[in-house]
Image (spheres, rainbow, N blue to C red):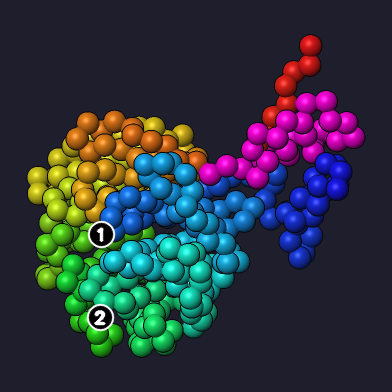
Amino acid sequence: MLLKDKIGDLHQKLINETGNYVRSLQGYSQHIRALVFSPDSKSIAHSSSGIKESVKLWDINKKNIIETFREHKCIVWSVHFSSNGEFMVTCSGDRTVRIWETKTGKCLHTLWGHTNWVRCVIFNPLNFMVASSSDDKTIKLWDIYTAECLHTLTGHQNWIRSIVFSPEGQFLYSGSDDCTIKKWNAKTGELINTVVDGSNKVQIWSIAISFDGKMIASSGNDQFIRLWDTETGECLNQLEGHNSWIQSVAYHPQKHILASGSYDRTVRLWNTQTGECLKIIHGHSKEVVSVAFSPDGLSLASGSKDGTVKLWNLETYELIKTFKSPRPYEGMNITGVTGLETAQIETLKALGAVEDKLN
């Protein structure tokens, strides 16, 4: 196939059923959506959106892609590992939850049941139950071996963007656009109580639980992080410093330290006992949408709409590595190629091609 024909074919792939552009070619990107470390802290999985929705698994030391998981048909919103690292779970705007064998990249189960985008998935830390939350306002608990839906949890009045198990796996907490955080029995699916009643009218976009299970941090569509007592629902503190929405929060696995990623393009580290901001980390050129601590507690990863995942040293706060997936035509030299229109040349460049200036 001639290069010109390949570009024409690429144009066609980017047009949806109604004839409208899915995304402009010059606006092509690989926005990071979510990221998580493997339990041994040796690899990072992240979801991204581009021409092909996918999840990539990186070897941190070698800085190469170990596996790419591609079967979802829409945005992959969340990814998580089982406690032993053997399995990975993902969820998508295609309304499915998928269970993968990490080593082989094989999709073991596709779980159907949600009727809208599935926003968050997480393994129970002590067994192989998976919880998923959706824009259909429900949470589902799944047995990953039988692919059976064990329970459907109802009670939220809007999208459920974030869920987290307590450290011992006994409870499940959920944060929603209805501005509430609810606490559930992870075994029976019964609602225990509404920890945060929504009176502050702030949507809950991300929640994280402390290593001792006593405190939940929440963030959303304002500039503050709120710390809540998991038993009483009392707001213990409000962390101020970001100057835009806060998309993601994550707790350190052994310390009272919280990380936050914001639309202001920064990552911040906080002492949740004192409320002090320990460090402001700069480095991303666009909004930071996901943060995660390594299980060994030595590093922090941040993912951004600039298409990169950055790994930071928690002792020095220095940048260790930057991970960025190659674009579809990365490094292709189109210097001197004839028969291409200007728009097609710009398309190729946006997708990674290079054109040297002719002397």
**Left or right position of 181 against 349:** left
Looking at the picture, tell me which residue is in the foreground, 295 or 114.
295
* Neighbours of disc 2 within 10 Å: few (<14), some (14-19), many (20+): many
Looking at the picture, tell me which residue is in the foreground, 127 or 86.
86
Say whether residue 224 is visible. Answer: no
Give the percent coordinates (x, y) of residue 323.
45, 41
Give the percent coordinates (x, y) of residue 96.
51, 74
| Mark number, residue 139 | none
User: Up-down: is 328 above or below 152?
Assistant: above
Q: Is residue 77 magenta?
A: no
Looking at the picture, tell me which residue is in the foreground, 305 or 337.
337
Quarter of the view holding residue 88 = bottom left
Residue under label 2: 186
Give the percent coordinates (x, y) of residue 170.
19, 77
* Real-space CA distance between mark 1 and mark 2, rounded to the nearest whole angstrom: 16 Å
Q: Which amino acid is tagged 1?
A: Ala
| Mark number, residue 208 | 1
* Neighbours of disc 1 within 10 Å: few (<14), some (14-19), many (20+): many
| Secondary structure of the residue carrying numbered label 2 | loop
Residue at horizontal 64%, vertical 53%? 51
Question: In the picture, which quadrant includes the C terminus?
Answer: top right
Give the magenta part as a residue range: 325-351
